[in-house]
Image: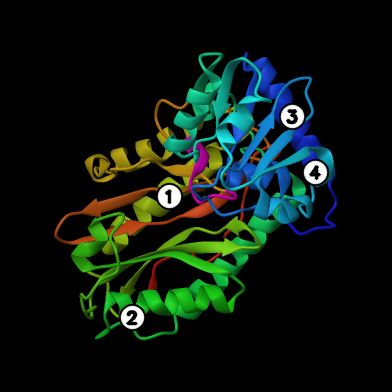
Amino acid sequence: MTAGADPSPYAERLDRAARVAGEAGLSALLATPGPDLMYLTGHAPPPLERLTLLMVAPDRHPVMLVPLLERPAALASPAADLMEVVGWADGEDPYAAAAGFLPPGRLAVTDQTWASHVLGLQEAAKGRTTFVAAGPAMPPLRAVKDEEELAALAKAASAADAAFADILGVVFAGRREADVAADLADALRRHGHRTADFTIVGSGSNGASPHHEAGERVIAEGDAVVLDFGGHLDGYCSDITRSVFVREPPEEFERVHDVVRRAQQAAFEAVRPGVPAEDVDRAARDMIGDAGYGESFIHRTGHGIGLEAHEPPYIVAGNTTQLEAGMTFSIEPGIYLPGRFGVRIEDIAAVTEDGATRLNEAPRDPQAVR
């Protein structure tokens, strides 16, 4: 967001953060540089050793403490009029300054807060407060997206689809995984991404490692290749996976691919408001298990996505969080056969009032590349 943007989303977000914190029995929520601060205020300073701290508390006006040299940028942020912006100068103790306005009691700190900052605040507060991690202490603020956020995620997903269409036209055989990864990054940027944050290219046996880093292996004819890539566009993330083969598929690839495709569809069809997140995971896992590949599905079915590539809700066994309209997450089952190949298919899904919609529409059937 930029200066002059409509502050109303931030007013609602700050009010909701204060209310949710109070309902969770917290005296305040403390946010430092990262996606939570960006979400609540539109201010996105770099995470540095100089303390930037937003306090949102029930029945109190929000306060943001910033290094004095960064105060002009903070005052230009879209939510500046909704909070008090206090500067501290080099040579002063920022933790003592923060302690002057922090309420006593349980304070939740956002997950990206540096340990050194928490320890400094603890020392300055002199036992008046207890610090807890915001993640376990209160419901996630960013899990349910508004219409603007959903539109941004759809735009990012569409750009990732376009990058995949481009990559189908490049030569794979005889080139290194790293070369194809560079092509993917270029395609993401060409279609509007500010950053290409990850470009997994797992060819042949490397595809059986879900988080394989593209390396020096030369892709050969007959290889299956897992392509998992994404980045940031207008502040929001993309993340898509498709599995292709070079000219001719390896033995069993088409059967495995079909099982993964059907598992992904089953998980998608399980999504609707009120359904526990773990039920979506179970739908994919049961399909893969029934096909005889249960031990080869070695990760959760999905993760939330928004300002971060990985955020709540997590689509995993044991997560009883009930899905709500506006939640967005990946659905990405996979089968990994060590020493041979892997297959994963990933789309971003958004929960609607009566089900779900896919934000990615790149083809999910097996694709041959050169």
The crowding category of the residue bearing disc 1, from other C-alpha atoms within 10 Å (few below 14, some 14 to 19, many at least 20), is: many
Determine if residue 217 is in view: yes
Q: Which mark is residue 57?
A: none
Q: Which quadrant holds the N terminus?
A: bottom right
Residue type (three-letter) at the residue carrying disc 4: Pro
The crowding category of the residue bearing disc 3, from other C-alpha atoms within 10 Å (few below 14, some 14 to 19, many at least 20), is: some
Q: Image point 73% across, 22% down: which residue?
A: 19
Residue 97: x and y in percent read: 63, 32
User: What is the distance, in whole Å, between disc 1 and disc 2 at their CAs?
Assistant: 25 Å
For the residues carrying marks 1 and 2, which lies nearer the camera in this image? 2
Residue 50 shown left or right of residue 344 in the figure: right
| Residue on which the image places disc 2 | 179
Pointer 1 or 2: first along the chain: 2
Residue 66: x and y in percent read: 65, 44
Q: Nearer the viewer, residue 346 or 260?
A: 346
Q: Image point 65% across, 24% down: which residue?
A: 102
Under circle 1, the secondary element is loop
Specify the segment rendered in magenta: 306-315
The crowding category of the residue bearing disc 2, from other C-alpha atoms within 10 Å (few below 14, some 14 to 19, many at least 20), is: some
User: What is the distance, in whole Å, between disc 2 and disc 3 at their CAs?
Assistant: 46 Å
Under circle 4, the secondary element is helix
Pointer 3 or 4: first along the chain: 4
| Residue on which the image places disc 4 | 9
Q: Nearer the viewer, residue 189 or 159?
A: 189
Residue 228: x and y in percent read: 40, 62
The answer to whether 209 is drawn above or below residue 168 in the figure is above
| Residue on which the image places disc 1 | 332
